[in-house]
Every structure is written in C-alpha cells, then in structure tokens.
Image: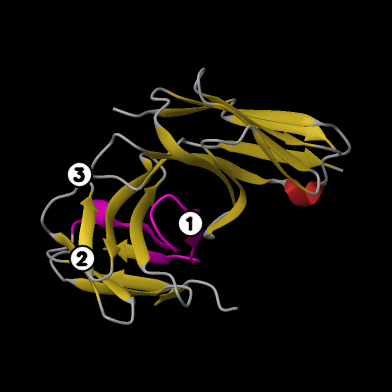
C-alpha cells in the first residue's frame, strides 16, 4: 500500500532563506508526483507536476526533483518570502494501487517571517 | 479559462440529514475526483469518475456516494450525516488518468 510522508511537519524561516521540503513514498510505481500549496481554509493550488519519466520541474523560485528509485521528492524554494507561508502537500498518483486517485502526505506547514 | 467550481462554499447540516455537493470541472476535463480533508486524517480519497463511470472508490462507508453527468459535472451525496463527516470536501478535475489535477476551493461542511 502506497504511503506518502512529508518531513518536516512544520518549518519556520526568516525571509530570504532558501529551503527544502521533503517527500517520500513507499512504492516507486507511480504515474507522477504533484506538489500543492494550501492556504488556511482554502483549496489546493498546484505548484509543480513531475511525470515518472522526469527528474525535475521548475517554476519561478520553485524547483521540484524526483528520484523514483529511492522514493523521494524535494521541493526547493529560493529566496523565501512571507507570501510563501502556507501548507505544502505532496501527492502521488500510484500505478499499482487500485481504488485511489491521489495519495497525499500530511503536509509541511511553512512560516516565513519578515 | 474557468477553474474547478464547487458549490456551495459552506454548509451547516444536522445529524441524520443528507447533503449534496456539486463540482463543475474545467471545460474539457472528463475526470473528476473527490477528497475529504480533516485535521486528523488529512486528505483522503473518496471516489473518481471518468466519462460518467465510477473508476475508483476509496475506503468510505456506503453513505458516501457520487455521480457524474454527461457534461462532466459531478455531485457527491452524503446520507445520514454524522458529526465526524464535518470536513472540507475538495473536488479535482483532470484531462485524463496520469495527468495533473486541478482542485476547487472546496465545500466546508459542518454537521451539528
């Protein structure tokens, strides 16, 4: 059964720092991995989608990598800003797990102070 | 291009009642999936529809059901509401299996 873990659960950094959020999954048989951002009480905003054949994707200050063989993904945020404060969720679309669409981690709650 | 639209945004229901939530996907998207988000359990998959057929179903009781119409709009129904059904219900649409998902803003259901 696919399980997704995100570490750390919470992170506080001063503005301007570069930071890395981690995501690990137990079954490497995935279609893709998607990073989302969620503001309190809101829906999910897609940040980056990495297909299983890709190693990384970039969008602005965000860079996500995927190492399928080791079951790991990282989300790198450069030059963090207070507006980056949110919960970041990692989700995988598993090939083997019938009965599910996306399997989510519990998220990392990021707080960036000015 | 319009995003995923969920209605209503907020709902307050009494235990034992039933509720219907609606989701309109992005135009052209034929896959619609539903998720329940609670502080304790996080995001859990409910079901997924593709071209009016339920393709996948999560581990939820039969009180949770859904359907998809020919225009890809989807509805989710919860019967005999329990206090534990209080949650943010999120809908997501996708072009097809294996593509990325776009989420709506969710429906906040409170059962009292």
Q: How many marks?
A: 3
Note whether A77 is above or below B88 in the view shown: above
Q: Residue furthest top?
A: A70
Of residue A74 and residue B109, the one placed in the foreground of this image is A74
Q: Are marks 1 and 2 in contact (CB under 8 Å)?
A: no
Assess disc 3: are there few (<14), some (14-19) or many (≥20) residues with their C-alpha within 10 Å of its C-alpha. Answer: few
* Camera-nearest label, 1 or 3: 1
CA distance for labels 1 and 3: 21 Å
Based on the displayed image, in which of its 4 quarters is residue A51 positioned? top right
- Which residue was labeled with disc 3? B59
Q: In what quadrant of the picture does the C terminus of chain A appear?
A: top right
Q: What element carries label 1?
A: loop
Of residue A68 and residue B9, the one placed in the foreground of this image is A68
Badge 2: chain ID: B
Assess disc 2: are there few (<14), some (14-19) or many (≥20) residues with their C-alpha within 10 Å of its C-alpha. Answer: few
In the rendered image, residues at marks 3 and 2 fall on the same chain? yes
Note whether B14 is above or below A87 in the view shown: below
Q: Which residue is drawn at 46% across and 35% down?
A: A105
Note whether B61 is above or below B29 in the view shown: above
Q: Are marks 1 and 3 in contact (CB under 8 Å)?
A: no
Assess disc 1: are there few (<14), some (14-19) or many (≥20) residues with their C-alpha within 10 Å of its C-alpha. Answer: many
- Which residue was labeled with disc 2? B53
Q: What element carries label 3?
A: loop
- Give percent across and percent down for residue A102: 39, 45
Q: In what quadrant of the picture does the N terminus of chain A appear?
A: top left
Q: Is residue B99 magenta?
A: yes
- Which residue was labeled with disc 1? B101
Q: Earlier in the sequence, mark 1 or mark 3?
A: 3
- Give percent across and percent down for residue A64: 67, 36
């Amino acid at each position: 059964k696919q399980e997704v873990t995100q570490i750390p659960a919470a992170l506080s950094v001063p503005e301007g720092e570069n930071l890395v959020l981690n995501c690990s999954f137990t079954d490497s048989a995935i279609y893709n991995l998607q990073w989302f951002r969620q503001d309190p009480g809101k829906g999910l905003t897609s940040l980056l989608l990495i297909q299983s054949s890709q190693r990384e994707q970039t969008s602005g200050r965000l860079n996500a990598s995927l190492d399928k063989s080791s079951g790991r993904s990282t989300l790198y945020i450069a030059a963090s800003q207070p507006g980056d404060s949110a919960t970041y969720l990692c989700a995988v679309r598993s090939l083997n797990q019938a009965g599910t669409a996306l399997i989510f981690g519990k998220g990392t709650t990021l707080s960036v102070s000015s | 291009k319009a995003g995923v639209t969920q209605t209503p945004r907020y709902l307050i229901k009494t235990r034992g009642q039933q509720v219907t939530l609606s989701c309109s996907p992005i135009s052209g998207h034929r896959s619609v999936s539903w998720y329940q988000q609670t502080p304790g359990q996080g995001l859990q998959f409910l079901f997924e529809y593709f071209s009016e057929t339920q393709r996948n179903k999560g581990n939820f009781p039969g009180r949770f059901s859904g359907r998809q119409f020919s225009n890809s709009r989807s509805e989710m129904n919860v019967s005999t509401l329990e206090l534990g059904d209080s949650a943010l219900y999120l809908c997501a649409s996708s072009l097809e299996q294996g593509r990325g998902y776009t989420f709506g803003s969710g429906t906040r259901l409170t059962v009292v």
